[in-house]
Amino acid sequence: MSEGIDKQILDSYLTALFDTDKAGALRVVQEALDGGLTPEQVVFEVIIPGMERMIGGMISDNLVTLSQHFLASQIAEEVTDRLIPLFATVPEVQGHVVIGTSHGDFHGLGKKIVIGCLKARMFQVTDLGINVAPEKFVDQALEVGAEVIGISSMMVHTATGERGPKRVRQLLREQGLEDRLRIIVGGAPYRFHENLFREVGADAWGDTAAEVPGIVARLVREVRS
Amino acid sequence: MMTGMERFGALMSGGTPDRVPIVCNLLDQGARELGLSILEYYSRGEHVAEGQLRMREKYGYDTLTGMFYSALEAEVMGCRNIIYADDGPPNVGHLVINAPRDIKRLHVPDDLNEHPRFRELTTCIGLLKKEARGRFPVLGVVTASFSLPAMLMGVGPWMELFLNGDPALRDELLETCSLFCSRQIAALREAGADLIVYVDPLASATFIQLRKFRELALPWIIRDLEAHGPAGVIFFNGGGRINPILADIREHAGIGAYYLNPYDDITEARALLGSNSLIAGTINDIRLIDWSPDEIEREVEKIMLAGKRAGGFIFGTLLMPCGIPEENIRALVAAAIRHGHHAESVVCR
């Protein structure tokens, strides 16, 4: 497949993402496969660049909407799940993340978007769901051998409350796990307060879902080093 | 010195009040004020009215908020489980819509006051109206039809439906939600709400691009307000940026007041709206949790400067988190009073 054709495919895919046209985006993916692109090329040269264009608002005059993020992530997850079994070689897992919303928080959208982005970048993800107790984050992270705990909060009190990320940090400290596990947080309150992630005991935060894989990769490297 | 009602009245009739009116959205804090749990507090309209009155008296802002919590609207539409916290707003714990057939089963009561919790809300608004004695406007709050489904089925499934789902099913749901919105506006007005805060986060530029807004959300804003008209309605951002959609709403829905997001530029909003609309500029109230009084003062001064230049200006907060210390609320209102005075004012008495 020539570079020119790849660019055309990527442009068509980006246009569909921009228009939040799921059927259109999936059609581009299927046509790319039918046209001879390998599953690896589709994931690494179409899906992931599409997701990365979301970072910094490279589409739509610097204003990328949540619906565009949502769609890009949803397609990334669906296509990646479908195509990974067809890869010529098993892809290397970049790390393992357990993720959920903080205790008392029933808003799952941000988490869902982040999961799609992580899976497309070959991270293994264990979804703990919504309204997750702090103890469960730690127990599950140990059980599956995760390096990173992701905690999403939509409301201030679930981000800063005593059963939220602060308690997860406390549990890691009490159990001597701080070298083995990192905490990343995300959600609306952190976007309005750039230092809030430190105050709740997290190691990092993600402003947009699309930038999370890069941050998680850094956290995984820290744990593994 | 003018009352809050006179300040709003002056602005709405094109005049200049003695100072910029202040809207301070304290909700769950009322429970702390009365020494009640949040569950107890919201069980009675009398409690919430008392909490609102005490907080307005204590801090000195210009409005009374006749609102319990957003999830109450989902309760009226059939939500059977509300999750209460000690330090934040009650949350939807049961989604009313889990399958397409649930959309067809949705029912909007002819009289919303048949629902016991809604009746407590209108009782609260009635009490606020009575106790305000015309001095402070009572705000009623409704969720727009385009945003209500997020509370009934979850944000993700709703986005999936309105972006790529069955258009007939989407419109059926929106019809029902619009009927609910319209009936709610009528009920809150009848109970005594002077102004209606119309909340539409899903329509904001944070959620959808302008083209989708025009195609999917704007027609429903027009529809929601068709029966009662846009007079006395304030379009509230609900946490998303709204500058990109202001001109369209102004032109097509005729709403005369816009409550911006902290990240919306006030000067730009004025340019987009022209001179005849009111603008509420907001402070980033999550930062009030740990800003010092000096930092609050500087931020308020900055917002007031831009607002007074823009004209037709109201100073506001989003929904103030419970974690904001009392001294910071006092610092906020004191700074807003200090920096909100107009050099020349028209006395409306």
Image: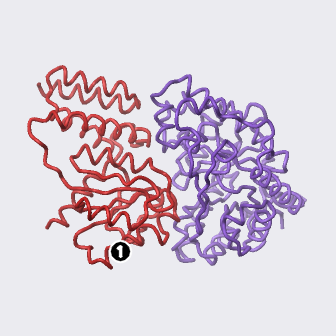
Q: Chain of mark 1?
A: A
Please state if B201 lies on the left or on the right of B184 as rendered: left
Chain shown in purple: B
Q: Which chain is red?
A: A
Q: Image quadrant for the N terminus of chain A?
A: top left
Q: In the shown orientation, is residue B279 left or right of residue A92?
A: right
Q: In the figure, residue A133 lies in which quadrant? A: bottom left
Residue B22 in which image quadrant: bottom right
Residue visible at 31% across and 57% down in the picture: A98
The spot of residue B297 in percent (x, y) is 59, 72
The residue lying at 38 percent from left, 33 percent from top is A18
Q: Does residue A1 appear left or right of residue A114 in this picture?
A: left
Which residue is tagged 1? A171
Secondary structure at numbered mark 1:
helix
Work out which residue is located at the far left of the displayed protein and give it: A89
**Pointer 1: residues within 10 angstroms few (<14), some, or many (20+)?**
some
**Along the line of sight, the residue nearer the viewer: A48 or A88:** A88
Q: Quadrant of the C terminus of chain A?
A: bottom left
Amino acid type, callout 1: Leu
Residue A135 position within the rendered picture, expressed as x and y whole percent measured from the top left = 38, 68
